Amino acid sequence: MLDEAIKRTSVLQSRLKDEGISHAVFTSESSIAYLAGFWGYLGIEFGRPTMLVVPAEDAPIVITPLMESEMVSEMTWVKDVRTWEDIGQRSWGRALARALPDAPSEIWIEKNDVPAIVRNFLDERYPDAKIKDIGPILGAQRMIKSPLEIEVMKQAGEIAGAMMAAAHGSLRAGAHEYESAIAVIEAGTRKAAGFLTDKGWERFVSPMIHNLQILQSGKDASMVHRRASVKAYEPLDPVYFCFCNMAQFKQYKLGFDRMFHIGGVTEDGARVQQAAIDAQQAAIAVIRPGITAEEVAAAANAVYAERGYQTGYRTGRSIGVAYLEAPELKAGDTTVLKPGMTFAVDGGISVDGVTAGRIGDSIVVTETGSDYLTQYPRELLVTDA
């Protein structure tokens, strides 16, 4: 993984030279993981930034809190790791200023991801510098996944499959939503652990599946991002599991969703769910190199319209080291699909307060079409009890 990170950074530096960019500052965990090969378990929500400064003509610089520097130095290939402290003169602002030119005319940052405290510092310290967005430049590089990245995402898909099987197995009338979440976490963690060793870089990769389980059941099934509660399942309840914030491995994220029905399904529930499945399958059927992102969305939207549904729900999003990358499968995105792109492709309909239809899979674009990264039956799923 670190060898790939070195190559990626070299490619980025060549692009910086071509664009006349002297330095770029990265603050998002996903970009730092992609280029420097490390991530932490504390984040900017604690007011403690970690940054990666990539000069076009020199070696990259990592800026990280002193307390995390030992782990960072072991995880990353970057040799220049500069530390800062919470008190005294060794602040992160001073470290960042020393990594940048004295009086830059422009500073390239991730505009959509930069923490407010970092942006405020740059605005105050360099009032005459133009702030420009490096996000699209690195984003274009991240669109096409390498064979190693695809292999890691396939492993993430196996982990997600184990999670979904555990979710399915947890369902019965009288069981509780939180019990399903516990089963998902345990199954995913055990599967992830099987792909890891305790040697070298991998010893820093946690197998633990975490984040709050997105799960809603019964009349709340239409609430797309409600979290698992103490609610007990009832007969004929629809139950929706979304793993989009949990199905990940070595920082690579997938999209994966399924809807189940407890012991049986209502006529409305079956109709809505089948429409969602058919819309998703229509979208996946047209995915191939040369087609545009919005054409994929149009294929799904045609099914919704035929069945009498309207949706503002995008059909999919690019996935990788971030939950949301470019391009998106939605109207107006004219990006041409290429082999090696990876997407979460969804089917989704909500009938507020009544029911919903949901399905989601992750795929990789191939030379002739697409292959699934996630596997679970793509049909109406009804439990025995």
Image: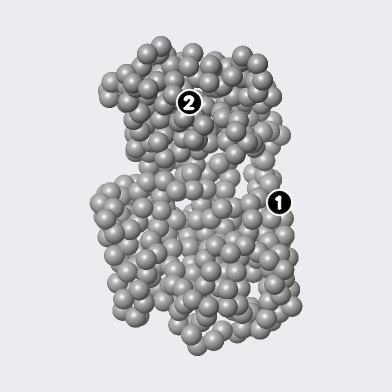
Quarter holding residue 162:
bottom right
Q: Position of residue 43 (x, y in %)?
A: 60, 36
Q: Which residue is mark 1?
A: 190
* Quadrant into which the C terminus falls: bottom right
Q: Position of residue 75 (x, y in %)?
A: 61, 27
Label of residue 282 in the image: none
* Residue at 60% from the left image edge and 77% from the top image edge: 218
Viewer-side residue, 179 vs 284: 179
Label of residue 121 in the image: 2
Classify residue 128 as left or right of residue 96: left
Q: Position of residue 40 (x, y in %)?
A: 62, 34
Q: Is residue 167 visible?
A: yes
Quarter holding residue 79:
top right
Of badges 1 and 2, nearer the viewer stands 2
Check disc 1 and give the amino acid type. Arg
Q: Is residue 277 above or below residue 333?
A: below
* Residue at 32% from the left image edge and 69% from the top image edge: 301
Check disc 2 and give the amino acid type. Phe
**How many numbered marks have been drawn onto this rendered protein structure?**
2
Q: Residues within 10 Å of mark 2 (few under 14, many from 20)?
A: some
Viewer-side residue, 197 vs 89: 89
Q: CA distance from mark 1 to mark 2?
A: 43 Å
Regarding mark 2 in the picture, which secondary structure is present there? helix
* Badge 1 or badge 2: first in the primary sequence: 2
Q: Is residue 158 visible?
A: no
Classify residue 322 as left or right of residue 174: left
* Residue at 30% from the left image edge and 67% from the top image edge: 299
Q: Position of residue 230 (x, y in %)?
A: 72, 68
Quarter holding residue 381:
bottom right
Q: Is residue 26 above or below residue 381?
A: above
